[in-house]
Image (cartoon, rainbow, N blue to C red):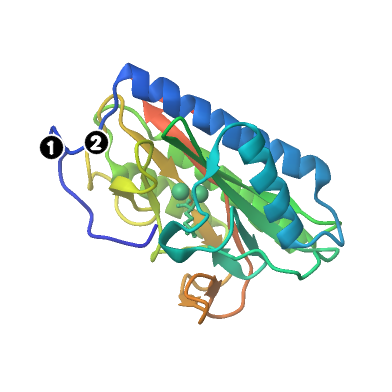
Amino acid sequence: MEQMKLEGYPVPGRKLYKNEQQIAGIGRACQLSKQILEMVREKINVGITTNEINQWVHEYTIEHGAIPATLNYEGFPKSVCTSLNNVICHGIPNDTPLEDGDIINVDVTSILDGYYGDVSQMFLVGEPSQEARELVTVARECLYLGIEQVKPFNRIGDIAYAIEQHANRHGYSVVQDYGGHGVGLDFHEEPFVQHYGDRDCGMVLVPNMVFTIEPMINAGSYKCKKLRDGWTTVTRDGSLSAQWEHTVRVTETGVEILSE
Ligand code: MF3
Ligand code: CO
Ligand code: CO
C-alpha cells in the first residue's frame, strides 16, 4: 500500500488485533491465495501473457468460492497484479507475452467468507541472468529476515531495519513509497509496515495483530515512478525490482505465517 505516517502505539478498538474466529477465516483466505500461486507456478512459462495469468487466477478464485480482491479495487481493472522486471508493484495484466529471462511478481489477494488473504511471489521465466536471480533470492531473504523480527513487543522498525540492512549489504535499495499493511477484515488496514529505516521505532507488536510484510527491493535506486495508467509503478532508473509477500500473525511468542 502507499506510504502513510508511521503510527505510534496500538489503541484498542482500532481493528489492530483479531479474534480467534477472524484469524481462522483470514488463515483460510491466505491458504487459498497461496494455492493460487502454486497453480500459477505450474503453468507459467515463456510465451504466456499476463492476461492469461489474470484469467487463471480469476477463474480459480471464483471456482473456490472466493472473490479476487483487486478486481475493481479503487478502480484496479484486473484480478491479480503482475509486476514484470522493472515494475515494482501494481502491474496491470496485459497481452505482452513473457520472455525468456524475465522475472515477474504475481500478487494474489482473495476474499473468502469476507476475510482477506494477501501473498505474492516471484517467478523466473526461462533462464534469467545471474544478476536477476540474485535479486530475487535476496528479496526473499529480506522477507524472511523481516518475519524473524515479528514477536510481541518488537516494533515495526525492527522489521524495517532487518530488511534494509540485508538489501544494502547486497548493494540493493528498499522502496520507500509502498509498504506492508494490516489485513484481514479489509484489504488495507493499520498498521503501515515500513520496510526501511531505524529499529526500535514504529508501532509495538502485540499478539494477534495480522499484517503483511512485502519488501520491494531494487537493483538500483529506490526511487519510483507511477505510470499514467494510475497503477503501474516502475523504478525511476529502469533497474530490476523484486518483491515477495506474506500475511503474518503475531503469536504469544513469535510469528505464524498464515500464507505459507
Ligand atoms: N496486493 C497488493 C498489496 O500487497 C495490493 C494491490 S492493490 C491493487 O498490498 F489495486 F493494485 F490491486
Ligand atoms: Co499483495
Ligand atoms: Co499486501
Q: Is residue 100 above or below residue 145?
A: below
**Can you give x and y, in whole percent of width and height, for residue 40 in the image?**
74, 44
Question: In the rendered view of the protein, which quadrant contains the C terminus?
Answer: top right
Q: 10 Å neighbourhood of mark 2: few (<14), some, or many (≥20)?
A: many
**Can you give x and y, in whole percent of width and height, for residue 71 in the image?**
52, 55
- The Cα atoms of the two marked residues, 1 and 2, are separated by 8 Å
What amino acid type should be assigned to the residue bearing mark 1? Val
**Can you give x and y, in whole percent of width and height, for residue 161 in the image?**
37, 49
Labelled disc at residue 260: none
The residue lying at 41 percent from left, 62 percent from top is 74
Q: Is residue 248 above or below residue 158?
A: above
Q: Nearer the viewer, residue 58 or 239?
A: 58
- Please give left or right for residue 22 compared with residue 234 in the image: left
- Please give left or right for residue 245 compared with residue 43 in the image: left
> Dot 2 corresponds to which residue?
16
What amino acid type should be assigned to the residue bearing mark 2? Leu
> Dot 1 corresponds to which residue?
11
Q: For disc 1, does the CB lie below 8 Å from ligand 3?
A: no
